[in-house]
Image (spheres, rainbow, N blue to C red):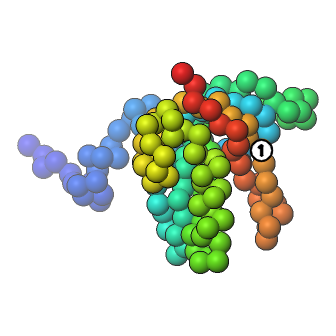
Amino acid sequence: MAEPTQSKFGALAQLVGRNLDDIPDLPVFKTPPPGVYTFVIESCKQKDINEKAAIVTEYVIVDTIELNEPDEYEEEERVKAGDKFSEAFWFDDPERVEQTTSVLKAKYGGFGAHLGTTNLLEILEKMEGLQVKGIIQNRVDRKDKTKIYPQTRDMVVVA
């Protein structure tokens, strides 16, 4: 009887030795064209990005309600249900911390009544899983004009 050969991948062979159809695809992170959407707040947590403290909120598109300029975007530029996008709120500049917390208040404070709290930290911790309707705009990076980031506003909880 022949000895079973061992993979050069060792213990990892069991993890990666699967049919490609059985491995989930990576989520698509995409900047949605400006418009009105419904989306789910998938997560909100602290992250260190390039050694800078930030709060990052990740969203999952549920539906496109209306695009600002529908004829301006080809089908492949649009988002579909399941696509993701995120926003980062930076806390690396001590002189801008109050401004950043004010932005968070303006953006998420309206969820307080639905979540039963007026404490910003509690809102941020409890808002995961909320389905919301809101406007998504695009903003250009100050330093690199080729980078475009999504920016949410006027979000309301969908009952």
In the depicted structure, whether residue 118 falls above or below residue 75: below
The residue sitting at 23% across, 55% down in the picture is: 11
Callout 1: SS = strand
In front of the other: 118 or 108? 118
- Asked if 154 appears above or below 148 in the picture, the reply is above
Q: Position of residue 86 (x, y in %)?
A: 60, 49
- Residue type at mark 1: give it: Gln
Outermost residue, left side:
1
Where's the C terminus, which quadrant? top right
Q: Quadrant of residue 1?
A: top left
Of residues 130 and 29, the one nearer the viewer is 130
* Position of residue 87 measured from the top left corner of the image (x, y, whole percent): 62, 52
Residue 76 percent location from the top left of the image: 76, 34
User: Is residue 135 in view from this perspective?
Assistant: yes
At 77% from the left and 44% from the top, the residue drawn is 137
The residue where tag 1 is placed is 137
Q: Is residue 159 left or right of residue 66?
A: left
Label 1 neighbour load within 10 Å: few <14, some 14-19, many 20+: some
For residue 145, above or below residue 128: below
The image quadrant of residue 143 is bottom right
Nearer to us in this view, 103 or 130: 103
Q: Residue at x 54, y 34 (%)?
A: 40
The residue located at (48%, 46%) in the rendering is 118
Q: Is residue 24 left or right of residue 85?
A: left
* Between 130 and 84, the one nearer to me in the picture: 130
Q: Is residue 87 left or right of residue 12?
A: right
Q: Residue furthest toward the top?
A: 159
Q: Would you say residue 81 is visible in this rendering?
A: no
Q: How many marks?
A: 1
Where residue 113 appears, as percent x and y from the top left, is 51, 35
Task: Tell me: 57 left or right of 115.
Answer: right
